[in-house]
Every structure is written in C-alpha cells, then in structure tokens.
Image (cartoon, helix red, strand yellow):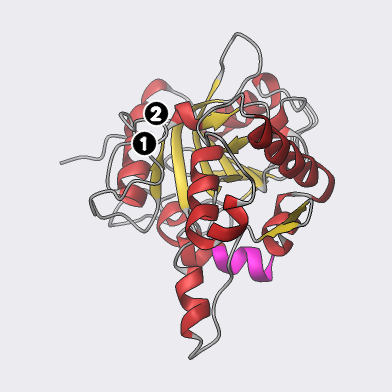
Amino acid sequence: MPTDTSEKGLESLIMRHMTGVDGLAIAPNTAAEVRAPYGGTGYIAGSAQDYDRAHALDVPQLFAFLHATQPDAFRKLALADANDASDINRLKFLARLSAEIGKRGVIDVLRKGVAHGPLHFDLFYGTASKGNARAAARHAQNRFSITRQLAYSSDETRRALDLCLFINGLPIATFELKNSLTKQTVEDAVEQYRRDRNPRERLFEFGRCVVHFAVDESEVQMCTELRGRGSWFLPFNKGTHDGAGNPPNPHGLKTDYLWKEVLTPAGLTNILENYA
C-alpha cells in the first residue's frame, strides 16, 4: 500500500509512529491516566485542548510529571484543583515557570529546574549513569508527548500548528508539514512560518521552543528563532552523494529519519544533554 503523504496523512503517519495512535481523539485532562500500550517510540499523544496558550505549556502533562516524580513538593503547591484554570496557586506556579522559561530559555529550565518560593522542581531527568537504578527509574518517568493540530494563538483566529512536541509539558519543537500532492513543498512550510507564525505569540518567543521544523516527504528545514520575514531556516537533511537533499529511502519517506532517528526519546535526550 502506498504511503499517504497528504498533509493530514503525514500528520497521522508521524503520530502513529511516535505514539501508536493518530492523536485525533485524545480527551483533555487525562494525562495522568494509564493508557493502553499501542506501540510507538515512547511518546504520549497529547490533547490539543490541554495546551495553555497564556503560558505556552501542556499543563496536564506537566502536572502528571511533577505528581509522579516529586509528589511532596507538588502537594505543597496547595492546588485546590489542578484542572481548574482559575485556581490561584495554579496560576502563580504557571506564571513563575513561564517567566523563568522566558528569561532563561526552555533548555536551561529543563536542565536546572525552577524554584517557586521555598520549593524546587526538577523539570527533566537526564540519562542515568551505568548501574544507577534510581536515576534510571527517574529518567523513565520523563513524559515525551506530541500534540496534533495545536491551537496556539492567543487571538480569536485560533491558528493551529500541525504538530508540537513537548517534554514534561514544556514545548520543544513545532512542525509545519507540506506535501507534493497539493503541489506544496518544504519551501511553502518555511513561508508559512515566516508569514503566518507571529513571533510575538508566546510559543514563538525566542527561547521558549528549541526548534521549528518545516517538513515535506523529501526535505527538512529548521529554524531556532522565528523573526517573521527574517526567519532563517537551514537544511536539516542527510545529504546525498551529490551534496544536498536526502537519499532515497527504500523503507519509507526520505524524511522519516526526523521522527524515527533524531526525535526519539533517546535521540532528543542526547541533543538536550550534549548539543543544545
């Protein structure tokens, strides 16, 4: 059967490979629930309804991670209802975390955590050294998630990204996907970022998200800072014997290395620890 490389087909292909499901019917506020093992590469399918546009966070994924890994500190936040967006203690903590991400960048916050009053919260557990079972157990509790059709905009247009990847509720990568069936290419995805993705939106502020990917079935480009028309995208391809682009892939799309190799939990952890 030929691969469906329409834009929605590519979304589904990536979601199914990473999570085991297509990600279209994920109920909100269910991040803490144990989900059936559908396969995938270790990612959780997030709910677009869980995204907090004001703070640029997937709050249920964040709280599920904190509750599982740091229950005493999480309890001391004294949240009357973790799912109530108007809860004052919830708002104070999210405002603090969002401010720290805005000031220090998401990578530094993931690496060093965040202080909130007398409390300290770790936001990511790195690779454990050999033989350290406790550290390995903590690392296994990191929540890698990916959300489809993320309505990111704070205005009433509710513009949506094709995909957004998170670690423990903090945004890491966004994706705009294009396909040749509609006569669109990676260049159209780049143009969409430059034209339609306002860098003043919270998610697109510099440092709040590590990278933005423009993808079609043949090539990938990436940008680390959106500046409207001045956004600078670089090729993120494997290269060929002739130089640019990607070699033929007998087992799938030319660009599937992005989600099959680079952005696996292990691959992304390696990037955060050693290269970012």
Q: Is residue 207 visible?
A: no
Relative placement, left or right, of 246 versus 233 is left
Q: Is residue 69 magenta?
A: no
- Label number found at residue 10: 1
- Label number found at residue 7: 2
Tag 2 secondary structure: helix
Q: Residues within 10 Å of mark 1 (few under 14, many from 20)?
A: many
Image point 62% across, 31% down: which residue?
Answer: 190
Relative placement, left or right, of 203 versus 145 is right
Instruction: Provide the residue span drawn in magenta.
Output: 269-276
- Label number found at residue 126: none
CB atoms of marks 2 and 1 within 8 Å: yes
Relative placement, left or right, of 99 versus 189 is right
x, y percent for residue 47: 42, 33
x, y percent for residue 102: 79, 41
Q: Residues within 10 Å of mark 2 (few under 14, many from 20)?
A: many
